[in-house]
Image (spheres, helix red, strand yellow):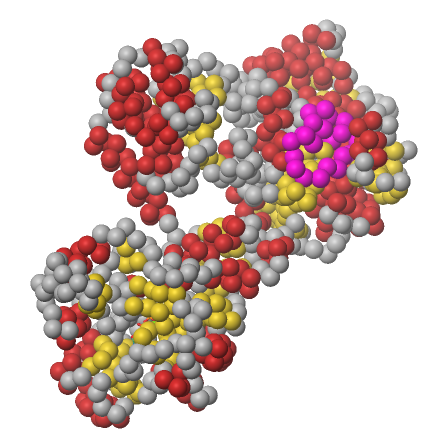
Amino acid sequence: MRILKIQTLRGPNYWSIRRHKLIVMRLDLENLAETPSNEIPGFYEGLVEALPSLEGHYCSPGCRGGFLMRVKEGTMMGHIVEHVALELQELAGMHVGFGRTRETATPGIYQVVIEYLNEEAGRYAGRAAVRLCQSIVDRGRYPKAELEQDIQDLKDFWRDASLGPSTEAIVKEAEKRGIPWMSLPARFLIQLGYGVNQKRMQATMTDNTGILGVELACDKEATKRILAATGVPVPRGTVINFLDDLEEAIEHVGGYPIVIKPVDGNHGRGITIDIRTWEEAEAGYEAARQVSRSIIVERYYVGRDHRVLVVDGKVVAVAERVPAHVIGNGRSSIAELIEETNLDPNRGEGHDNVLTKIELDRSSYQLLERQGYTLNSVPPKGTICFLRATANLSTGGSAVDRTDEIHPENVWLAQRVVKIIGLDIAGLDIVTTDISRPLRDVDGVIVEVNAAPGFRMHVAPSIGIPRNVAGAVMDMLFPNEQSSQIPILSVTGTNGKTTTTRLLAHIYKQTGKVVGYTTTDGTYIGDYLVEAGDNTGPQSAHVILQDPTVEVAVLESARGGILRSGLGFEAANVGVVLNVAADHLGIGDIDTIDQLANLKSVVAEAVFPDGYAVLNADDRRVAAMSEKTKANIAYFTMNPDSELVRKHIQKGGVAAVYENGYLSIVKGDWTHRIERAENIPLTMGGRAPFMIANALAASLAAFVQNVTIEQIRAGLRTFRASVSQTPGRMNLFNLGKYHALVDYAHNPASYEALGAFVRNWTTGQRIGVLGGPGDRRDEDFITLGKLSADIFDYIIVKEDDDTRGRPRGSAATLISQGITQVKPDCRFESILDETQAINKALDMAPDNSLVVILPESVNRAIKLIKLRGVVNEEIQPQ
Ligand code: ATP
Ligand code: ATP
Ligand code: MG
Ligand code: MG
């Protein structure tokens, strides 16, 4: 077996609209191509021995053991690789269930599709599955040690990629609410929502979190001063910078017991509490000194440690933090009890799990001593033995939910304190003997205010009810369902995508909104180019969706991007499908028009249920997509008598129709005439029918998004097929005696569309300069030849500079064959070099003729034309 290609899909795709995270592996079974599993001696037994848990895979029989039954009876290796790859991820703790295996048009070559949670793990699982199966085929077994290593590696990928527990809670909540999120490439930033409606977070800081509030909270002494001045109970204390001042400071706070801590520490670092002797105080000073220059000396308040979480001015959770401890069982020593406690799978290193492993430090031994223990003591059954003085989770502490117990006055106080400090999300550390009583009744204090408080003690307390604190954050950032989104309009089809995308963006600009759009020529925001290039894939979509200035996204979604990585967004508000025609067949295992239609249908299907699929009623494969999408349907048609559209309107649907020379929106009994085709420059005075179709699609897409008829009309009237707005799409140049047209048509359907316009050129000769990209099939070139023979009076066949692997001259020969097949007497010649071919055509052009150039490089073609002195760049509306 040999892996030919591995692709990672990240959005709605050819295989599934709902499952976005898929690995597609193109697998050559080689010598196993004709050998089902039952014909490989010992394979079944070897597989069961290596992965007995495959028993749990139902597969087509639909029962436990179903898949293994298929292996026993005989199934192809691609299918087995799929199940093994899923099971390996499962064994590493990643729950994935979706898989598909299909043979391609090339016998023996399969596409194996597997779900993943982590991209790298998914790709690894695919490769490991091939290795495992091959080993069982060759040797009857897969070594246990290797399997263990595979699973360990998979676990490592999963762990390394995991977000912190607070971020995890936030993105999970976002997903639950359908709020899109993505990781930005620096500073652990997470983007929630799209375009202008996005919010950013970094752990539990949001872009509403003020820098002044954060800096104040980070300075414990300043916080205390501000709070003390407003009558909030805070520990009595002072700040010193020299050891010499320590004695006086202790006196100042009223003597022992005291606490010594760094002014700007966190996670309990450098803190010593309950100091009762001068020796301890000196040691405490040194410890704090390691963390900070300035040192706080304050009174030690007896009580339990509480964390009160305030989000958007409201207390949303309260947890009591219990310092790391073990509970005696009457048999084990303290050392043994710690070891046992740390075996808990919930305890990880640092912040990566619900709890953290207990580690001892200097204060631990002191604490044990005070309790009368050493590490070897065996505490009696049921006694609690504390191991750390402070209760931070990151030093092995645990949490008990107390949200329902906090006294209303303490709620009021906490909310007021957070307002005073000025934070949208804050965690208050409160020391009190009883949180259910007002602080001042029990001499409780607010020890500090934390910016960016951790969520893990609230979402996963060791005891008590987990609180959905991330929900409160989402409520604050996105008060209603829509507030994280911007309208996304996605456009696909075989021909006319770029034109329609640009026109739609132009129409939308009439609403005054900032429109971001991606096309084959580049990515644009408003009137400016962000990045040139063929930007029709998901990365370019992300550039637009991540941009904080963009209010509306119009995205050209081409086949290549959908096939390679899936759509770059979960669902659109409007999905436009213009047409499906033969093009690029045979590339990427899309061999038939129906497969191509299935691929384009992703755009119609990945639409919100309350959104619209805008479909071409005149193209049967596109019209049929209405069956597959859950969204509303809107049709456009060039045929005012379309039966399909008539029925659709009868049922209350909306459509765009070309009738009596007008582009009109039809809904119920109403026909809103938008504009006469003649007045729409893009349609070349109404003479280019396919452009009318594109304009109908764009108008309809805008209309269902509540753009007004007036705005649509203004857009249609002012959008010109000029070099500046749509380079390479029907750019017509008046050269005085004759005209030249530059266009990108490169497949049969677009040739025919273009032909409809060229045939309308009745004033003189029609000369064509044409060729096609080398990666098409032989028969495609012959077809192009045949079609052009019917359109032009004279043809110059040329080739692209980049032949895409084809021998030079081969494409031209095939086109020439096509020409002579339909019109043996057709006048044509072959000039392979594009520049020479264009110049020849311009040189020979008789008066009143039209030279149609279908170039590889639009810029070069336009330059060559302009050298001849252009009179007028485009046909103006009549
Ligand atoms: P974190 O980052 O976890 O909030 P920190 O390093 O910022 O911790 P503090 O919150 O100031 O440090 O102190 C840690 C813990 O020590 C407090 O939550 C509290 O339990 C205890 N503590 C601190 N100061 C006092 C005090 N004056 N009296 C009693 N306990 C105190
Ligand atoms: P690409 O796949 O190269 O990105 P595209 O789908 O974006 O193409 P456009 O760039 O808008 O299409 O148009 C390319 C050419 O296709 C046009 O110049 C024209 O010849 C032809 N064309 C445009 N619209 C249609 C249509 N609705 N039907 C058929 N042909 C069309
Ligand atoms: Mg604290
Ligand atoms: Mg395009």
Q: Nearer the viewer, residue 497 or 839?
A: 497
Left or right of residue 432, residue 596 in this image:
right
Q: Residue at x 36, y 32 (%)?
A: 87
User: Image quadrant for the N terminus?
Assistant: top left
| Magenta part of the chain | 616-639
Q: Residue at x 23, y 76 (%)?
A: 272
Q: Is residue 737 visible?
A: no
Residue 576, by quadrant, is: top right
Q: Nearer the viewer, residue 160 or 664?
A: 160
- Residue 329 drawn above or below residue 642: below
Q: Is residue 781 visible?
A: yes
Residue 637 part of the magenta segment? yes
* Residue 431, position as x, y percentages in the image: 34, 78
Residue 446, by quadrant, is: bottom left
* Residue 478, position as x, y percentages in the image: 58, 60
User: Image quadrant for the C terminus?
Assistant: top right
Q: Residue at x 57, y 53 (%)?
A: 194
Residue 386 part of the magenta segment? no
* Residue 223, position as x, y percentages in the image: 40, 81
Left or right of residue 349, residue 87 in this image:
right
* Residue 639, position as x, y percentages in the image: 83, 28
Left or right of residue 516, residue 653 in this image:
right
Q: Residue at x 83, y 26 (%)?
A: 643
Total marks shown come to 0
Q: Nearer the viewer, residue 530 or 233?
A: 233
- Residue 155 drawn above or below residue 853: below
